[in-house]
Amino acid sequence: MPASPAAKPLLLDQSPDDWQLGAAPAYRRRQLTDWIFRRRAESFSLMTSLPAAFRQQLAADYELAPLQHVRTQGSRDTTRKFLFRLSCGDFIESVLIPANPALYGERADRFTLCVSAQVGCAYGCKFCASGLAGWKKNLSPGELIAQIMQVEKLSGATVNNLVFMGMGEPLANYRNLLAAIEVINADWGLRLGARRITVSTSGIVPQIRALADQPRQLRLAISLHGADNATRNRLMPVNRKYPLEQLFDACAYYQERKKQMLTFEFILIRGVNDSERQAALLAAHARRLNAKINLIPYNQVEGLPWERPADRDIKNFVATVKAAGVAATVRLEKGRDIDAACGQLRLRELS
Ligand code: SF4
C-alpha cells in the first residue's frame, strides 16, 4: 500500500504543548486532550464541543488515527493478537493477555498489553520471528500510543499493565519510547502509572543506563535466554556487543537507581538452555541481582530449528530455580493456541 498522500503530521506524535492550534484559546488544548484520551474520539468531526471551523482546520492539519485494524486472532478468554496496518503500509501487532487468576493468582481484571516498538528488528535473535525479516522502521510516539487505544476499543478491556515487548527492541527506539511513555503516564493522557509499564530489552547496555537516569519508575525486564556467554552468544547476537558482565553491571546500576525488582525473561529451548546447569546459573544471577524469573517454554516458529523442551525438563528447570530461593513463573498455557512468538502474525500477512 502506498504511503498516505497527504503525509500530514500525526497529532499523537506531538506533546499537546506543541500542537499548532492557531489563534484558538488556551482551553481548546484541554478540550482536545479530553476528546482524544477520555472520550476516545477517532475523528475530529466527532468532537462536537469544538467549533466546526476549528475541527475542519484540525482535520486539514493533522492525522488522528494512524492504525487500521486488519485482524484479531484468539478469543476473549485467551491471548489475543491484533494486527494493524500503519499509514505507510507496514504491519505491526499488539498482544493482549488476560489474567489467569486460577493459575497465577492474578486479579481477574488485569489485562497486560504487549506493544510493538519497531517494524521488524535489527537484533536478529535466533529464536525470534521478528528478527527474520530485519529492521524496517522505528514506530513513532503516536504509533506506540495508538496501539493501546485501539486494543482497548476493539477488546473492551482496560489495559492496566503495559509491556514494551512486541516486535522490535524498544531501547533501540529510545526517544520515541520515552515520548510515548510521557503521554501514557500523564494525567491528561492515558493515566497509566510508571510502575505498571515494563520495558523489555535484549540488553542494550547504554540505554539501560539512560533509562536508569530518567526520572520515571519504569520496570525493567531483560530478555536473558542464556545464563552464560556461550549460550547467550548462540541465541542473541547482541551478547557479543554487550556480554553478560556488562549487562549485569547495567542491571545493578538500574537497581541502585530505582530500588525495584528486575525481571529476567528466559525462553526455554530444548537442548540449548534447558539444562540443570543453566537453571542453577540463572538462579545465581537472579539472586545476586534481585530479579524474578519469567520462564517461557518455546513456541515453535515456522522455519526455525528450535523446539520446546519436554514437560519433565521444564519441571526440573523450574524446581532447580525455585530450590535456590528465586521467584519464578512459568507461562504454560498462554499463546499456545495461536502463534505466540512475536512477529508471526505480521510475517503471515507479508508472505
Ligand atoms: S527477541 Fe526482541 S530483540 Fe531479539 S530479534 Fe526478537 S524483537 Fe528483536
Image: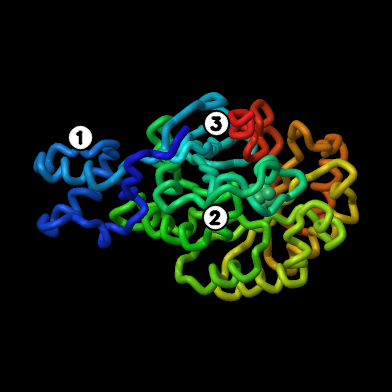
Q: Which quarter of the rendering shows the C terminus?
A: top right
* Snapshot quadrant of residue 310: top right
Label 2 amino acid? Thr
Label 1: which secondary element: helix
Q: How is the image coloured?
A: rainbow
Position of residue 287 in the picture relative to residue 96 (left or right): right
Question: Of the residues tagged 3 and 1, which is closer to the observer?
Answer: 1
Instruction: Tell me the tag on residue 198.
Output: 2
> Which badge, 3 or 1, comes first in the chain's sequence?
1
Identify which residue is drawn at 51% across, 32% down. Answer: 82
Identify which residue is drawn at 45% across, 39% down. Answer: 86
> Which badge, 2 or 1, comes first in the chain's sequence?
1
State how far apart marks 2 and 3 are (Cα): 19 Å
* Snapshot quadrant of residue 198: bottom right
Residue carrying label 3: 80
Instruction: Tell me the tag on residue 46.
Output: 1
Position of residue 182 in the picture relative to residue 23 (left or right): right
Label 2: which secondary element: strand
* Position of residue 42 measured from the top left corner of the image (x, y, whole percent): 29, 36
Position of residue 320 in the picture relative to residue 119 (left or right): right
Label 3 amino acid? Arg
* Snapshot quadrant of residue 349: top right
